[in-house]
């Protein structure tokens, strides 16, 4: 083979390789443009959400669950309402907002034991929630656990001595269930001192060991 022929062969080979390289570059460039147009390629990966953003989203979700639970309760769908309210509580919704509705729907669906359990759990953390404690005492009394009901009411009137219905309810339990006339007398007197013209005043006055005369 002559030198000229060899040179021509080398030139053709170099030209072919250069053409192939340009084709590959063009193909890669077109593929990149296509992926970008389709949203499959990104110059930078998305940044992870900040802790504050995640906390906000979690709070919004819990609030939405709570509102849905309340709406279902208003519609009379106690079972589904309870599910949403428990999910809201687990998701971080304030217990002060959830618990009254949760206990109410449990009572509405006659799940009294569940209502008692929820109320007790809440009162462990919020012992001054007197309204809920009175509801708990009423539930316990309704289920026949009179000593436990008395314990809750006693704690209630100790924390809030001016709780009129607490004294009256204690008086009734001591009089009718525990047959403790002296303690019933004490509670009825406390009731009358706070509400001498209250709706239960006549009954309380008639239940005293020694009737109290009304002084105008």
Image (cartoon, rainbow, N blue to C red):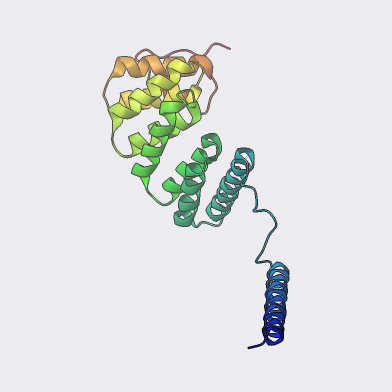
> Whole-percent x and y of residue 206?
40, 22
Which residue is found at the position 26% from the left and 23% from the top?
A: 179
> Whole-percent x and y of residue 95?
51, 36
> Whole-percent x and y of residue 86?
46, 46
Return the residue nearer the eye: 32 or 44.
32
Which residue is found at the position 38% from the left and 20% from the top?
A: 154
- Regarding residue 176, the answer to whether it shows in the image is no
Return the residue nearer the eye: 76 or 174.
76
Looking at this view, name the residue that lies furthest to the left.
179
Return the residue nearer the eye: 133 or 67.
67
Which residue is found at the position 31% from the left and 28% from the top?
A: 148
> Whole-percent x and y of residue 56?
63, 42
Asked if 14 appears above or below 200 in the picture, the reply is below
Q: Which quadrant: the N terminus? A: bottom right
Quadrant in the rendering for residue 173:
top left
- Regarding residue 26, the answer to whether it shows in the image is yes
Return the residue nearer the eye: 30 or 141.
30
Which residue is found at the position 36% from the left and 43% from the top?
A: 114
Side (left or right) of 88 relative to 141: right
């Amino acid at each position: 083979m002559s030198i000229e022929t060899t040179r021509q062969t080398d030139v053709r080979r170099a030209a072919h390789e250069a053409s192939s390289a340009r084709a590959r570059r063009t193909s890669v460039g077109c593929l990149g443009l296509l992926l970008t147009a389709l949203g499959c390629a990104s110059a930078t990966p998305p940044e992870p959400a900040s802790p504050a953003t995640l906390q906000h989203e979690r709070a919004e979700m819990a609030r939405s669950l709570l509102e849905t639970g309340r709406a279902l309760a208003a519609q009379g769908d106690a079972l589904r309402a309870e599910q949403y309210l428990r999910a809201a509580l687990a998701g971080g919704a304030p217990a002060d907002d959830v618990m009254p509705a949760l206990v109410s729907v449990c009572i509405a669906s006659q799940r009294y034991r569940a209502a008692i359990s929820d109320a007790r759990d809440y009162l462990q953390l919020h012992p001054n929630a007197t309204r809920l404690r009175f509801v708990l005492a009423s539930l316990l009394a309704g289920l026949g656990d009179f000593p436990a009901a008395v314990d809750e009411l006693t704690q209630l009137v100790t924390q809030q001595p001016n709780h009129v219905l607490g004294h009256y309810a204690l008086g009734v339990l001591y009089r009718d269930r525990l047959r403790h006339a002296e303690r019933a007398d004490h509670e009825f007197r406390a009731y009358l001192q706070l509400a001498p013209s209250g709706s239960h005043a006549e009954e309380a006055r008639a239940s005293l060991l020694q009737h109290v005369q009304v002084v105008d």
